[in-house]
Image (cartoon, rainbow, N blue to C red):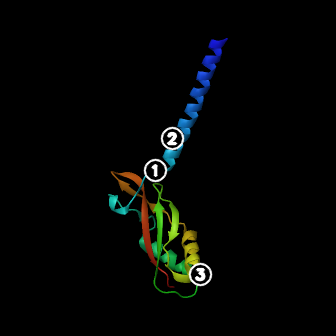
């Protein structure tokens, strides 16, 4: 009887350690390395091109209820290996009092990107985009 309990406990602890290891692998996989733009061999590009991105931005600004502004607004975000934007932030002082509204306009557009690459492998990259905030 003791031998059966011994094997049962070994099986149980083996099962627990497999669960812990599998959870750890998922955590590591979800925090892949994010590169800087200077590290890339191929820089990310908006799928519709930069000219269309600017056109969509200006059109959305003119449709919004923002007062006429001048200058630029700076957005920092991550372009994932799938071309999505994550962790979008507006730089402090960028756009002045209307920063939150400019942020909402930018977020609403949901630009898709052709991701950056290293050795022909798509990678996530930190990206900074400076846009005019006048319309």
Residue at left offset 53%, top offset 36%? 21
- The 10 Å Cα crowd at callout 2, few under 14, some 14 to 19, many 20 or more, is few
Distance of mark 3 from mark 2, alpha carbons? 46 Å
Left or right: residue 30 compared with residue 12: left
Q: Nearer the viewer, mark 3 or mark 1?
A: 1
Q: Earlier in the sequence, mark 3 or mark 2?
A: 2
Residue occupying the point 40% across, 62% down:
44
| Residue carrying label 2 | 25
According to the image, label 3 marks what residue?
A: 63
Q: Are marks 3 and 2 in contact (CB under 8 Å)?
A: no
Q: Is residue 29 above or below residue 86?
A: above
Q: Residue at x 59, y 31 (%)?
A: 16
Q: Earlier in the sequence, mark 3 or mark 1?
A: 1
Where residue 69 appears, x then y in whole percent?
Answer: 52, 86
> Which residue is found at the position 61% from the left and 83% from the top?
65
Q: Tell me the element at label 3.
A: helix
Where in the figure is residue 22, as x and y percent of width and height?
Answer: 54, 37
Q: Hey, which residue is sitting farthest front in the picture?
A: 2
Q: Which picture quadrant has residue 68?
A: bottom right
Residue tagged by mark 1?
32
């Amino acid at each position: 009887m003791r031998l059966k309990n011994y094997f049962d406990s070994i099986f149980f602890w083996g099962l627990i350690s497999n669960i812990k290891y599998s959870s750890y692998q998922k955590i590591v996989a979800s925090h892949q390395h994010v590169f800087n733009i200077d590290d890339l061999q191929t820089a990310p590009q908006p799928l519709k091109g930069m000219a269309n991105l600017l056109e969509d931005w200006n059109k959305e600004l003119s449709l919004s209820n923002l007062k006429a502004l001048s200058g630029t607004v700076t957005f920092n975000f991550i372009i994932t290996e799938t071309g999505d934007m994550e962790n979008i932030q507006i730089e402090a002082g960028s756009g002045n009092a209307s920063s939150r509204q400019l942020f909402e306009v930018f977020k609403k557009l949901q630009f898709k990107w052709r991701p950056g690459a290293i050795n022909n492998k798509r990678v996530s990259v930190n990206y900074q985009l400076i846009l005019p905030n006048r319309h």
